[in-house]
Amino acid sequence: MGLAIGGGTGPELAEIFERALRELAAREKMHAEIIRSPREYRTYGPMAALTSAEAVRATEEDAADYIRFVRELAADGIRVAFRTAFNAQSLYLVRDELLGVKVEPMRHSDGELLLIRDETQGFYSGRNDQPADPLRIRRETLFSRENTWCVLDFSIENAAARWGGASTSTELSSPANSICWRIVSRNGFATTSASEVFAFTSTSRIRRTGN
């Protein structure tokens, strides 16, 4: 399992996570190996002390390093990483690049609801741009039909893997399925924090059917 650590209380939380994981592994008679990212990713506090230009550069550096880290994990067959909190804008850039979604199953005595939130576009992605006026910030986010169908395809397949039924949007008349699968079939990677699970279409296969 990968481990990415942000600043602030991140190192303390990472130690707690490692102890908890090893205890759980021992109880299940499993071997747990943790691969740490060598970088400590910035949190909001240090970012707030930077100039706008410095903050842009810092967020892009952290995002690029985290993307490299999870892609290396995925290339080695590792599908999960735990991360402590780090600066939100860095995560927005990661989600934008890797096509991130939030997956949250909600169980109840009467059944189960699967919530999948699009984080590849809109509010949870995008970039900031500061015009000449220092009192103004312009934020740009994009929506595309291609990305939207990718999220829908992922959602349908995730549900089919859990409950059965239609496993691709082709069966639901997706007009862009062939385009979407060229992106989605690059495989999935999950990174977890205390409350989130993100499935990234990066380097390992997420399709349940086919090659």
Image (cartoon, grey):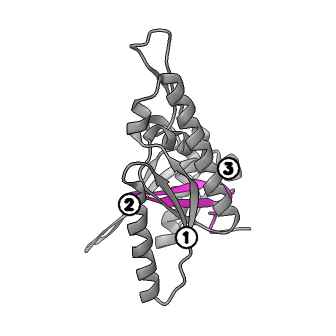
Q: Earlier in the sequence, mark 2 or mark 1?
A: 2
What secondary structure is found at the residue carrying circle 2?
helix
Q: Is residue 27 above or below residue 189?
A: below
In the rendered structure, find residue 34 and report the number of the disc placed on it: 1
In the image, taking residue 19 as reference, residue 35 lies left or right, namely right
Q: In the image, which is nearer the foreground, mark 2 or mark 1?
A: 2
Which residue in the structure is indicated by mark 3? 183
Q: Earlier in the sequence, mark 3 or mark 1?
A: 1
Q: In the image, which is nearer the foreground, mark 3 or mark 1?
A: 1
Q: Earlier in the sequence, mark 2 or mark 3?
A: 2
Spatial separation of the CA atoms under disc 3 and disc 1: 29 Å
Query: Is residue 43 among the parts visible in the rendering?
Result: yes
Query: Is residue 174 among the parts visible in the rendering?
Result: no
Give the residues drawn in magenta, as a range.
Answer: 188-208
Whether 172 is among the magenta residues is no
What secondary structure is found at the residue carrying circle 1?
loop
- Residue type (three-letter) at the residue carrying disc 1: Ile
Crowding near pointer 3: few (<14 within 10 Å), some, many (20+)? some
Spatial separation of the CA atoms under disc 2 and disc 3: 37 Å
Viewer-nearest residue: 69 or 208: 69
Q: Residue at x 67, y 59 (%)?
A: 72
* Residues tagged 3 and 1 counted as in contact (Cβ below 8 A): no
Q: Residue at x 49, y 51 (%)?
A: 101
